[in-house]
Image (cartoon, grey):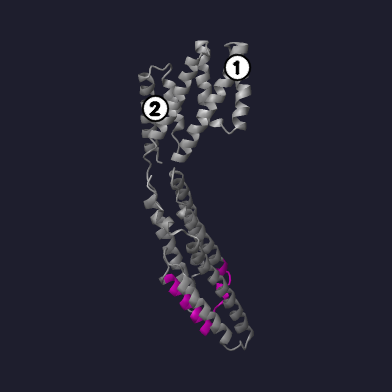
Amino acid sequence: MSIVQRTIKIVLAALASILLAQLLNLQNPLAAGIVAILSVLDTRKASLNTAIARFLSTLLAFAIASLIFKLVGFNIYAFSLYLALYVPLAYQFRLQDGIAPCSVLVTHFMIAESIAWQWQLNGLMLMTIGALMALVFHIWMPSYAKQLEQLKEEIECQMRDILHMMGDALTNTPDHFNEIHQGCRWLNHLLDQMKEIALTEYDNQLFRNSDYFLNYINMRRDQVHIMQHMTVNLPDLHLATESNNMMSQLFHLTADEFNELNTGTALLDNISQLYRVFRDSQLPTTREEFETRALLFQMLTDFERFLEVKRDFFVHMDPSTYQNRFVPK
């Protein structure tokens, strides 16, 4: 949520809270506006959880304050004793978000020198109005669907480019190694950025939570880690062998078919065929050929896992999850 959007919501929520409190003839209506200001957070879920916590915290604060003021009187020593009891209990019950606004409401008892039920109800109403107005103005939240789709496309484009460069490196030995490593680092940066946005989008869904993009990010991150592992031995695979050519073709084919909805099943069949070629081909005759064959076999095993990660993503995904990846808010 941008600063402009947050500012508009804070102003409107505070104004509406104060006006409603005045309409209901509540004492100290400005306190409702303060509660609203403190309750406008980044996401709907955070605002809802905070509103519930503050309501419960208000009940706790009023109970402690009523007991202390009845025994000690309405003075600063009583207020200090109230804080000494209330603050640790609020943290104990994870209600610390209400410490500041609840304590402000408690001071109203001191000003009125009364803990009558009318003042208790007045304070609860101020807290409820402020929290509810913050939630009302949180009904509209900016959608991050466009940013997530753009990042997804950028990630997949980058992965296609890296796969093509890896395929080229197996046959033409161009100096792509630095570009591949830089591309993998950039992919991790994009995934971190996408995860931050996806978590915000997830927390803005109150009733139907779609975790598609969070699972998608985890899947792509696993694939990037496998790619980084494969690039370690890539500079040593420089012999112009038939196995190199076939592995190179597999990388290029994967890059050409690389997209969000490709399950990778057909590509895994190609892996099986390549395994048979390895088994049926003639044994290496030189040490260099033997080392190259061993490294290629390791790379083939890693690449099989690369494709299995995508297949497993689809196997464990509910089809409706993809269709509802942007849940109506």
In this view of the protein, which residue sits in the foreground, 108 or 183? 108
Q: On residue 152, which mark appears?
A: none
In this view of the protein, which residue sits in the foreground, 71 or 10? 71
Q: Label 2 belongs to which residue? A: 14
Where 18 sits versus 239, above or below?
A: above
Left/right of residue 26 with respect to residue 226 in the rendered view: left
Q: Position of residue 195 (x, y in %)?
A: 48, 51
Position of the C terminus by quadrant: top left
Where 303 sits versus 53, above or below?
A: below
Q: Position of residue 159 (x, y in %)?
A: 46, 65
Q: What SS does tag 2 mark? A: helix
Q: Nearer the viewer, mark 2 or mark 1?
A: 1
| Image quarter of residue 263 | bottom left
Label 2 to label 1, Cα distance in Å?
A: 31 Å
Q: Is residue 166 visible?
A: yes
| Amino acid carrying mark 1 in the image | Leu
| Image quarter of residue 293 | bottom right
Tell me, yes or no, whether the two marked residues, 2 and 1, touch with CB atoms within 8 Å.
Answer: no
Q: Main secondary structure of the magenta part?
A: helix
Where 277 sits versus 316, above or below?
A: below
Q: Label 1 belongs to which residue? A: 67
| 235 within the magenta span | yes
Where does the magenta region start and end? 229-255
| Residue in view at x 56 percent, y 31 percent | 95
Q: What SS does tag 1 mark? A: helix
| 241 within the magenta span | yes
